[in-house]
Image (cartoon, rainbow, N blue to C red):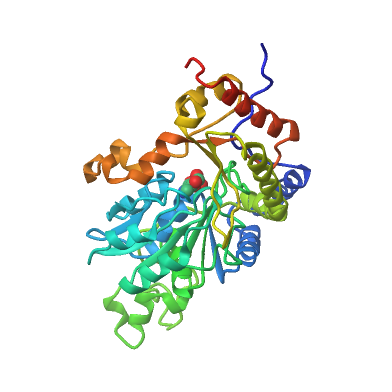
Amino acid sequence: MTYGGFIPYGRQWIDEDDIAAVVEVLRSDWLTTGPKVKEFEEAFATYVNAEYAVSFSSGTAALHAAAFAAGFGPGDEVITTPITFVATANCILYMGATPVFADIDPRTYNIDPEQVARKVTPRTKAVIPVHFAGQPCDLDAIHQVAREHGLVVIEDAAHALGAEYKGKRIGGLSDMTIFSFHPVKHITTGEGGMVTTNSRQLYEKLVMFRNHGITREREKWRVWRENIGTNADQYISPQNGFGNSKLAAPWYYEVQFLGYNYRLSDIQAALGLSQLKKADYFLKCREAIAKAYNQGFAHLPGIIIPYQRDEVRSSWHLYVIQVNERTAGFNRDELFIFLRERNIGVNIHYIPVYRQPLYHHLGYCSQDFPGAEGYYHRTLTLPLFSGMKEEEIARVVSTVTQALKHGDFPS
Ligand SMILES: *Cc1c(COP(=O)(O)O)cnc(C)c1O
């Protein structure tokens, strides 16, 4: 028996416009951070309704930068969800701070604000909610906890480009919001990421962090400012080697903290700009696929379709179904194998982060997270990407339905 070609759970959409945009940069003078990066950042900030956008070489680098700008350090605790890609929690470790996991809401799979409130201690510095699968978290409740305890809020919106909370686009609603442009996400730059913020101060830190902590802006120079009106010879000063002028040397720059090379290139930014023009179309495609799945599975016993809160519009990064073993007659693992054997690229998003060996030293146990554990054992992600064909959607629906009819199939 043949089952048709493999359908991946996610994949990029690249068309001739994207290719032409990249080729144009390759023929220009700028390959790395130049005019296209600026253009992409401005267009992106406008798209998500934020004051500032700073691009990075990946979503992970964007998380690292946000964690730095928020001032995470040893002794600080940062609360996040265990049901996320591990990069969300890793950015806390990068800064020497301690990740604290709060359990998820078993209906939305998002971090539960009540659990967040229960995990706050005097050492809590920040909370990083993740808009899981593209469905925005209960931001009002999270902001309420943050206000009460003076916490920074960094939204991980890697799944949520174009998503809305109470009619507002995700991106300008918290201190910082991060996005990813990995090929399975809504738009791609190959690898890439973005931090958006409405704070000038955070913006400036983010820009320096992605470029070695360097500033070329005279108003920010510390050594230069300190030397005005003092004996310049006692200091290592920008004036040294530039006569006795109070003007700084034209080559002068300062490294003010330990940063990285996390820059996005103009080649990637050109691709990002071209992709961003299609973001609304991609969103519509994703919504249409989710709707088709919802209809296809609505009356199947044993399959629980994604619950959506009224006040949100999901960007549908993932379509996650839950298997009710009792009514389905089989469990999630069996369904996973059944679908994979029939070339349906299902996946599990994600293994709870506290289960990873890197996190064992924090001493969490599964029993502490009934929401996350229930999620992990009963759910699976079906294929969903902008370019998915109708017959592919139909094949996924019919194969899941076929599994239900067989029930009890041998595993
Ligand atoms: C993809 C993803 C990231 C990391 O993004 P990269 O661009 O792959 O580094 C972070 N958080 C979540 C929730 C993601 O899905």
Residue 6: x %, y % from top left: 64, 24
Residue 101: x %, y % from top left: 32, 51
What is the quadrant of the N terminus in the image? top right
Depicted 134 relative to depicted 169: above or below: above
Depicted 18 relative to depicted 206: above or below: above
Which residue is drawn at the image coordinates 57% and 48% (left, top)? 181
**Nearer-the-camera pick, 18 or 183:** 183
Q: Residue furthest top?
A: 1
Which residue is drawn at the image coordinates 50% and 19% (left, top)? 408
Which residue is drawn at the image coordinates 47% and 61% (left, top)? 138
Q: Residue furthest bottom?
A: 229
Q: Quadrant of residue 295?
A: top right
Residue 69 seen in the figure: yes
Depicted 299 relative to depicted 94: above or below: above
Residue 270: x %, y % from top left: 67, 52
The tally of labels here is: 0
Residue 212 seen in the figure: no
Q: Quadrant of residue 2?
A: top right
Q: Seen in the image, is 122 located left or right of residue 125?
A: left
Which residue is drawn at the image coordinates 57% and 67% (left, top)? 166
Residue 180: x %, y % from top left: 53, 50
